[in-house]
Image (cartoon, rainbow, N blue to C red):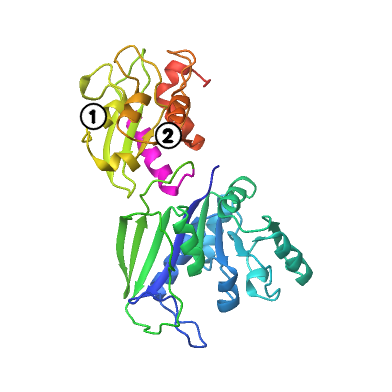
Amino acid sequence: MPHPYVLLSAAVSLDGYLDDTGPERLLLSSPADFDRVDEVRASVDAILVGAGTIRADNPRLLVNAPGRRAARLAEGRPEYPLKVTVSGSGDLDPAAQFWHTGGEKVLYTTDRGAERARALGITADVVPLGSGLDWRRLLTHLHDVRGVRRLMVEGGGQIHTQLLTQGLADELQLVLAPLFVGDPAAPRLFGPGSYQGGRLRLLETRAIGDVVLMRYRPTAPGTGPLPSAADHHWLALACELAERCPPSDTAFSVGAVVVAADGTELARGYSREGGDPVVHAEEAALAKTGPDDPRLATATVYSSLEPCARRSSRPLPCARLILAAGVRRVVTAWREPDTFVAGADGSGLLAAAGADVVVLAEHEERAKAPNRHLIGGGR
């Protein structure tokens, strides 16, 4: 299911704390960084904080610069991003600034929490998610119902932890402040958990006054049939590789990437790479990996087109090459049409052998783009 781009934003002390235990909020960012945060807020469709942040900080979560609000209106967007919070209990102060400033608000909660919130007079769109909170369902609702494409998550630490451990964060913007808290009772940014982000990829570092901004992107694939945010990154790369293929009227243009469970790229390839007129993308990529590489057993193959189940140009189709390499997880953008091989079912072949096949249809149009001359406007 499609999700918004999820951007986690936080500032921490040198020893990893979000705040101290004093009565006043500890200001970790510099004035220049607060302006940067305002710029990021102006760029997104929604801002999310947890119920604990509302109770502790009573935030307004506004775009403060008049020029940025005016620019949003000129673009046909609301003056302020949608404000989103999450509370299992629904027990929130109806007088909090969150509800009475800015534009529209949404509260995601449980069925019982919705009853509580409505009884308290919470002025927001209250969306019950059932007996428990489900982040994937919440993000899908934001995307499909509220039209949110970019979501900024400003806290707290528990929510950041849940999104990272479930592989749902696309980017982490972390500001490091030059001070120490040193109080073990103070809140930390991340809690214990099994993190799916692997070794994050550094996108940017920037000094902003006396603080440092670090932007990271998770790179680790999802597990089993559940996609992670990084799956979208790698599949987008496979679609980019498909655009490099030498043109052909008799074969698809496809890109493929092989990625280890920790997010390390093992190999990449594309159709007709290296002047070979019949080599397929998955075949080209797998040929660059060591046949005895133990990482292949837990790796993911990303292919812009479903791996072929039958072919006449080589002894083994790509689906069987993937299985022979020991790979048991494949992420693709669209199913192979009947253009060249009728009734091909690479996904079925892979699934029958115990592999997980994930189709991220959001990337289908980009995967089709270099093949329009073969498929026309259809599938």
Three-letter code for the amino acid on which mark 1 is drawn: Ala
Q: Which residue was labeled with disc 2?
A: 355
> Which residue occupies 26% across, 27% down?
284
Q: CA distance from mark 1 to mark 2?
A: 20 Å
Q: Which residue was labeled with disc 1?
A: 287
- Select label 1 or label 2 by which is in front: 2
Say whether residue 227 is magenta: yes
Residue situated furthest front in the rendering: 353
Q: Position of residue 252 (x, y in %)?
A: 38, 20
- Identify whether 289 is placed above or below 378: below
> Which residue occupies 45% across, 61% down?
8
The residue range painted magenta reads 226-244
Depth check, front residue: 33 or 121: 121
Left or right of 220? Residue 277 is: left
Depth check, front residue: 68 or 136: 136
Depth check, front residue: 284 or 352: 352
